[in-house]
Image (spheres, rainbow, N blue to C red):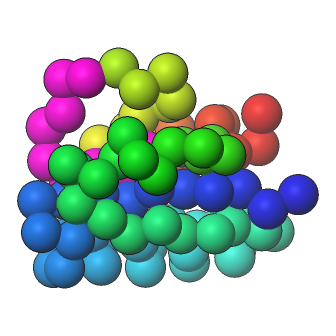
Amino acid sequence: MKKKVIVACGGAVATSTIAANKVVELCKKNGIDVEICQIRISEIESNLPGTSLIVTTSKVKRDYGVPLITGMPFISGVGVEKTEAAILDVLKA
């Protein structure tokens, strides 16, 4: 079953593109069929139906009722393995 992952940042261009590519690569390596929805943080709520996971590159304090993981390690390079493990935990559940 295809998993929908929202990848969001402030402008839906630079950092979310990097994070989205990393999520796609991770899912491909682990045999997870994924659909990426790359958007602005302000657009998360309207794109929620069917979402398995939200990955953001900005701080988000709101609870959307869907697991939310920060994708900043994909940008900074610090803590990437921990972030990848968290993403896999959610998508394999």
* Magenta-colored stretch includes residue 76: no
* Magenta-colored stretch includes residue 58: yes
Vertical order, 89 against 34 (above or below):
above
Q: Which residues are magenta?
A: 54-62
Q: Position of residue 80 (x, y in %)?
A: 35, 55
Vertical order, 65 against 6 (above or below):
above
Q: Nearer the viewer, residue 19 or 11?
A: 11
In the displayed structure, does residue 48 sit left or right of residue 60?
right
Q: Position of residue 27 (x, y in %)?
A: 66, 67
Q: Nearer the viewer, residue 12 or 42?
A: 42
In the displayed structure, does residue 67 sit left or right of residue 28?
left
Q: Nearer the viewer, residue 71 or 44?
A: 44
Vertical order, 63 against 39 (above or below):
above
Residue positioned 54% across, 56% down in the render: 5
Residue positioned 19% across, 79% down in the render: 13
Residue positioned 68% across, 67% down in the render: 34
Q: Nearer the viewer, residue 52 or 47?
A: 47
Q: Position of residue 31 (x, y in %)?
A: 81, 68
State which quarter of the image contains the N terminus.
bottom right
